[in-house]
Image: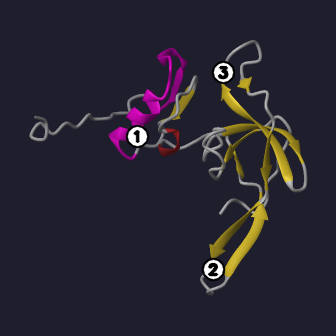
Amino acid sequence: MPPHSLTIKTNSVFRLLRNFSLDLGLVKNVRVVIIDVGTRIVTVRLLRGMSGATGIYVDSEDILIPRISFSAALPSGHTLMRRQFPLAPAYSTTFNSCQGLTLDIVGVDLRRPVFSHGQLYTALSRIRNRTHARLLFRPGEVLTTNVTYHEILV
């Protein structure tokens, strides 16, 4: 369940927490820019990537996102229900959430080890141009072994 308090400001970048429309591209984890905030509706535009003088490319079509119901089971057996916007700040993402995306700029924090070799590959393979990748690591501490099982290969 998302945090109980969400501060939404105009022109900030958020991600959707639910699928709304495959046709419109409104799917879970897609990034949107906040255009207007109401009590029951948030107006957003899809963030499509980086380009131009401003550095970002945003769709010109406004999309309305309603508040929806979230529920969580409590240990007491009760169910907690609340209505809120299905949005979360999109400052960063996980390796798993970026699968299937093509990104213009990627920053990867490797100060803590990745869970598996595949996660590092996923993070670094999402970028269009390798010169736009930034890695944060401690020199001498980053080592990833590419494990191949030759008996599986035919």
Quick one: which residue is furthest to the right in this view? 38
Q: Find disc 2 in the rendering and name its residue.
A: 74
Compute the Cα span from label 2 to label 1.
33 Å
Q: Quadrant of residue 80?
A: bottom right
Give, as a three-letter code, the residue at label 3. Answer: Met
Q: Find disc 3 in the rendering and name its residue.
A: 50
Q: Find disc 1 in the rendering and name its residue.
A: 119
On whether residue 145 falls in the magenta region, the answer is no
Quick one: which residue is furthest to the bottom in this view? 76
The answer to which of marks 2 and 3 sits earlier in the sequence is: 3
Numbered range of the magenta stretch: 115-138
Q: Badge 3: how crowded within 10 Å, few (<14), some, or many (20+)?
A: some
Please state which of residues 21 and 7 is positioned toward the viewer in this rendering. Answer: 21
Where is 85 relative to 117, above or below?
below
The answer to which of marks 1 and 3 sits earlier in the sequence is: 3
Where is 140 relative to 149, above or below?
above
